[in-house]
Image (cartoon, rainbow, N blue to C red):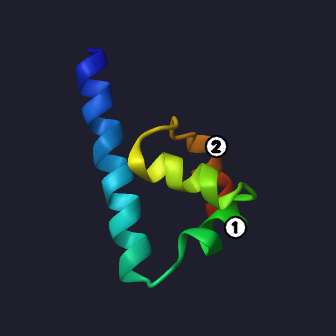
Amino acid sequence: MEDVLRLSEKHVIGNIRKIREYRAYTQEYLAAKLKISQNAYRKIEIGDSKLMIAWILHYEA
């Protein structure tokens, strides 16, 4: 079960990056929107940090 969740997380992270690049957003821009550092955002994109759904929901608000 944990493996399935990890694969889903990687899929979501990959989609976030693709959308960010498609819209020509920088990591700095999205980090500012999420009120986190660019370094923290970078770690999310490369999988070194957990993706927090609350960050995504906050961004959508």
Q: Residue at x 55, y 69 (%)?
A: 27
Q: Residue reaching furthest front?
A: 39
Of the numbered discs in the image, which one, if any, rests on residue 49? none
- Residue for point 31% across, 42% down: 10
The reply to whether residue 17 is visible in this rendering is yes
Quadrant of the image occupied by residue 6: top left
Q: Regarding mark 2 in the picture, which secondary structure is present there?
A: helix
Give me the residue at 36% from left, 81% from top. Answer: 22
Amino acid type of disc 1? Lys
Disc 1 secondary structure class: helix
Upstream in sequence: badge 1 or badge 2: 1
* Residue 2 or residue 49, whichever sits in front: 49
Does residue 6 sit above or below 47 in this rendering?
above
Q: Amino acid at mark 2?
A: Ala
What residue did someone put label 1 on?
A: 33
* 40 on left or right of 9: right
Q: Which residue appears farthest toward the top when viewing the image?
A: 1
Q: Residue 40: percent from the left, percent from the top?
A: 62, 49
* Residue 55 % position (x, y): 64, 49
- Which-is-in-front pick, marks 1 and 2? 1
Please name the residue that numbered disc 2 is placed on: 54
Measured as percent of width and height from the top left, residue 50 is found at: 51, 35
User: Which quarter of the image is occupied by the C terminus?
Assistant: bottom right
